[in-house]
Image: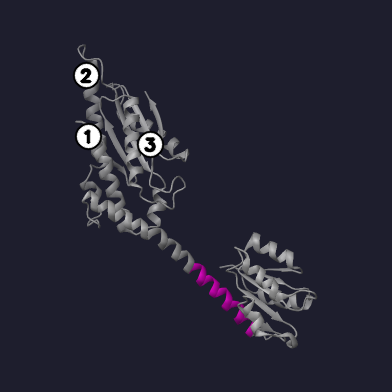
Amino acid sequence: MKKSIIILDNLEEQINFFRDLIKDSTHSFVDVDNELDLLDFVQVKAPDLILISSAIPDLDCHLVCKKIKLLEKGKNIPVIIINRDPRYFNVDLIFDAGANDYINYPFNKREVIHRLNQQLLIKTLKDNLRETTTQLHKIIPHYQRLQELVETSNLPVTNQDNEGRLHLIPNRRYFEEMLQKEWLRASRQRNSLSDMEGTDLSIILAKINDFEAYENNHEKEIVDSCLRIITQDVKDTAKRAGDLVAEFDKDTFAVLLPSTNTAGAQRVAQVIGNHVMELQIPHHFSSVSEFITFSFGLATGIPTQAIHSSNLIDVAQDCLQRAIASKQSNAVVTDQF
């Protein structure tokens, strides 16, 4: 992986030595001749390694090193002091200033390469460790929260098979079959002279925001538990006779609401969204919210035998895409035909 190295020096011969040494690698090399330019570069670019020459007149290389280590972006960057004059070489001053290593003149090419690579490797390992620690700090309380929810909902901590959600709710095919049946039933009812009202039919598509990011950053056990908790919560929301909650995609639920107009479907979507928000399942990788949230696409139709029920799904999917694009928690977009 390409690394960035900067040197603070005013000796052309010395700069060229390091430039020639580094040009054979994939690393980038920048040289500056004053303290301000170095500090600005650190603040903006945050290089992977800093070399500071002790040969610049009127410059205290140890003080410059201390200033770098006080910067938020500089505190974790390794610094190597280049000692030109052995008369001023002081190991205690170098390490007390926060430097990580030193290189003495005259240079031994093999030694210099080794020292540079060692500091770059150490920084990479430390960066990886910090990233891992950060992820653990996020995941541990997340798992604890899921454990609480699992215990409350009486769901198993682990999913014993790959079709666990299908044990809680029907799949998409069943949803589409029931939608078509309900569509035909309502259309026949509408054609009856004795019953012209209450035949509006609505569906809701509820998609978990940024689910792919959630799935990619958590263990399968956590993802499965999260999905089962949410599934149970959504299922408990639609309780009327004839209402149906099904799995539309791995991150999307479908809700069938017979005899329900747009306003009624909006209320159901709001209840689902509020219930899931109340669970407060952490989602640190979401661009929408710090917790698991939904985007909703709602479609309401007047059933008729001249139009297939799949058109209602198409409208709901279009609404869902617009809701997702809004990047808002529990965004609801509706349409009807």
The residue that mark 3 highlights is: 296
Identity, as a three-letter code, of the amino acid under mark 3: Phe
Q: Residues within 10 Å of mark 1 (few under 14, many from 20)?
A: few
Q: Nearer the viewer, residue 227 or 61?
A: 61
Identity, as a three-letter code, of the amino acid under mark 2: Gln
Q: Secondary structure at mark 2?
A: helix
Q: Residues within 10 Å of mark 2 (few under 14, many from 20)?
A: some
Q: Secondary structure at mark 3?
A: strand
Point out the frontmost of discs 1 and 2. Answer: 1
The answer to if 59 sits in the magenta stretch is no
Q: In the image, is 106 to the left or to the right of 291? A: right
Identity, as a three-letter code, of the amino acid under mark 1: Lys
Distance between the Cα atoms at labels 3 and 1?
19 Å
Figure quadrant of residue 303: top left
Q: Which segment did they paint magenta?
A: 111-128
Residue 256 x, y percent position in the rendering: 27, 32
The residue that mark 2 highlights is: 189
The residue that mark 1 highlights is: 239
Residue 161 x, y percent position in the rendering: 23, 56
Q: Are marks 2 and 3 in contact (CB under 8 Å)?
A: no
Q: Nearer the viewer, residue 261 or 88?
A: 88
Whether residue 179 appears in this view of the structure is yes
Residue at image position (42%, 47%) is 210
Image height of 92 relative to 174, above or below: below
SS majority, magenta: helix
Disc with the residue nearer the chain's start (2 vs 3): 2
Q: Which label belongs to residue 158?
A: none
The quadrant of the rendering that contains the C terminus is top left
Q: Secondary structure at mark 1?
A: loop
Residue at image position (23%, 53%) is 151
